[in-house]
Amino acid sequence: QVQLEESGGGLGQPGGSLRLSCAVFGNAAFIGDMAWYRRVRGNERELVASISSGGSMNYGDAVKGRFTISRDNAKKEVYLETNSLNPEATAVYYCYARVRRDGDPRSIDFWGRGTQVTVTS
């Protein structure tokens, strides 16, 4: 099985930073696109940032210029540096990965359970 585990959420101050991490565990033979999404209570989940296996990045308009996504393919991890935080960044952040498992030719979407980020003074 494949599992994604987020860490690094918590309380942040306006103007401050938090670093989120997500590790992929299990029989992942190949990891394609990885991403961070977030959901504000009552709203739909929205894309924060994505990164391909080759390192191409894409950002949601709300975080461009402030957040940075990166990945370490050897460690099977993806990161999100959140800078210049504002209260609007308060949300549950979810890690996503498209994974091909050992012995299975299909690529399947996997999600983490989410980590809460709360920005407050």
Image (cartoon, rainbow, N blue to C red):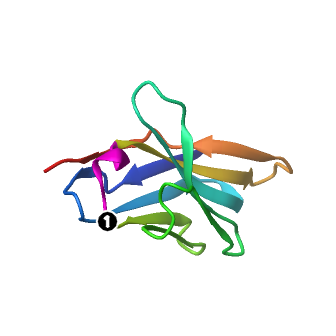
Magenta-span inclusion, residue 86: yes
Q: How many marks?
A: 1
Magenta-span inclusion, residue 73: no
Seen from the viewer's position, the closer of residues 66 and 12 is: 66
Residue at the extreme right: 105
In the image, residue 76 lies at what x, y percent? 56, 66
In the image, residue 4 lies at what x, y percent? 52, 49
In the image, residue 114 lies at what x, y percent? 43, 41
Q: Is residue 114 left or right of residue 97?
A: left
| Residue 111 figure quarter | top right
Residue at the extreme top: 42
Quadrant of the drawing holding the N terminus? top right
Seen from the viewer's position, the closer of residues 62 and 96 is: 62
Residue at 33% from the left image edge and 44% from the top image edge: 90
| Residue 19 figure quarter | bottom left
* Residue 40 in sight from this viewpoint: yes
- Give the residue type that dot 1 points to: Ser
In the image, residue 35 lies at what x, y percent? 58, 55
Q: Is residue 9 left or right of residue 36?
A: left
Is residue 51 placed above or below 113 in the rendered structure? Answer: below
Residue at 84% from the left image edge and 47% from the top image edge: 106
Residue at 54% from the left image edge and 36% from the top image edge: 45
Residue at 35% from the left image edge and 46% from the top image edge: 88
SS class, disc 1? loop
Seen from the viewer's position, the closer of residues 33 and 26 is: 33
* Residue 1 in sight from this viewpoint: no
- Please provide the residue range marked out in magenta: 85-90
Residue underneath mark 1: 84
Neighbour tally class for label 1: few under 14, some 14-19, many 20 plus, Cα within 10 Å = some
Seen from the viewer's position, the closer of residues 9 and 74 is: 9
